[in-house]
Amino acid sequence: MARLVLKFGGTSVGTIERIKNVARRVKAVVEAGNEVAVVVSAMSGETNRLVGYCREIAPLHDQREYDAVVASGEQVTAGLLAIALQELGVPARSWAGWQVPIETDGAHGAARILRIDTAEIERGMKDGKVAVVAGFQGVGPESRIATLGRGGSDTSAVALAAAMKADRCDIYTDVDGVYTTDPRIVERARKLDRITYEEMLEMASVGAKVLQIRSVEMAMKHRVRVQVLSSFEDKPGTLVVDEDEIVEQELISGIAYSRDEAKVTVLKVADRPGVAAAVFGPLADANVNVDMIVQNVSDDGRFTDVTFTVGKADLGLALKVLEDNKAAIGYRDLHTDGNVAKISVIGVGMRSHAGIARQMFTTLAEKGINIQVISTSEIKISVLVAAEYTELAVRALHTAYGLDAAA
């Protein structure tokens, strides 16, 4: 007997018929002799509808009441799935986050999980009862409902699996696993049988939307084995596991891309100690996340240009912060470019193999693609290119690193 946490996203529970389909899948897992807890998202589109209500009533609303409203979507799904399971003869009950309880901090709208008391849920599971838990939510200070931010149901599921020491956390979604790149761009993309936590974290951080970043971080911290698989097809998915579980590791696991980047260049800043702090300190204070950074010093050594990227959604705020701090920074001008894309090559094999970067740069050069900015980590190389070359770059790199599926 295994103890499993199953998580179903919004598209998986988007209609009553799909909820019934989920109930049948859960029943099959229970009948295989497993202890099961299920975490559910709101039905697809429901959270957006509830958010719209809040904004329509008051654009600057009380975030605590906002959480009370938007958390109701998951509670509806949990109740409906519990009913559907009971109709199939499977004992089940629904749990709101505060009933478990899933305790969080007070950062409403983006709360972080502090502790989960699973004792009551586990007692029911040992008696064969399925616990259907509303994802995306918990209970904060003063017994107020708190939500975890978009994609928070993945985090709920992994956290619950960690708290109850589950054997695995299965994330059911509208894709059947993790691919070497976006199959919509590269027809010969391959589904991976296994991928390391580190690789999945890098892929999630640079555009791959299969798993939410916080959930991968939590899985890696607590060593929760995660499987990504389809709600609509009955076939194995991709396991996200510790590197030690992968016997023969691929050199490169995937090519990721993001079109959500914007480039900012701060021109003619005096080249003096503290200039980087003067530029990036105010941005950090405004919670603007800066990614790729490059600095070019003038020939005479007096000035430097600082180029960096931010999310497109943060571009307006970043410019305002820089303009408000122009006197302190001492720059001459600002240039921005939202027509860029970040392309990343990811693989733990980079730790022990040379020439990965050269292969990337050579491949892009052969396609006439100019690299604007470069950043690296231990298992990732990212470049910024003009957005019009996104698909060409991804296809070329996928082929160059031998990731194409056999014809």
Image (cartoon, grey):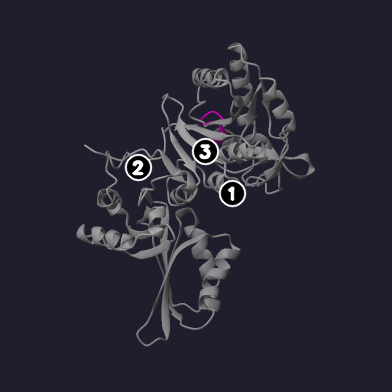
- Tell me the kind of residue under disc 3: Val
Looking at the image, which residue is at 25% across and 48% down?
A: 399
Q: Secondary structure at mark 2?
A: loop
In the picture, which quadrant includes the N terminus? top right
| Residue extent of the magenta highlight | 42-48
Q: Give the x, y percent position of residue 61.
A: 66, 44
Say which residue label 3 marks.
226
Determine the secondary structure under disc 3: strand
Question: Mark 3 or mark 2, which is nearer to you?
Answer: 3
Residue 381 visible in the snapshot: no
Q: CA distance from mark 1 to mark 2?
A: 27 Å
Q: Give the residue type at disc 1.
A: Lys
**Quick one: label 1 or label 2, which is nearer the N terminus?**
2
Q: Is residue 398 visible?
A: yes
Q: Which residue is mark 1?
A: 221
In the rendering, at what x and y percent does residue 162 appear? 63, 40
Three-letter amino acid code of the residue under disc 2: Asp
Q: Position of residue 201 (x, y in %)?
A: 48, 49
Which residue is situated farthest in the right direction here? 142
Res. 182 mark: 2
Looking at the image, do the residues carrying marks 3 and 2 touch, with CB atoms under 8 Å apart? Answer: no
Q: Residues within 10 Å of mark 2 (few under 14, many from 20)?
A: many
Q: Position of residue 175 (x, y in %)?
A: 41, 33
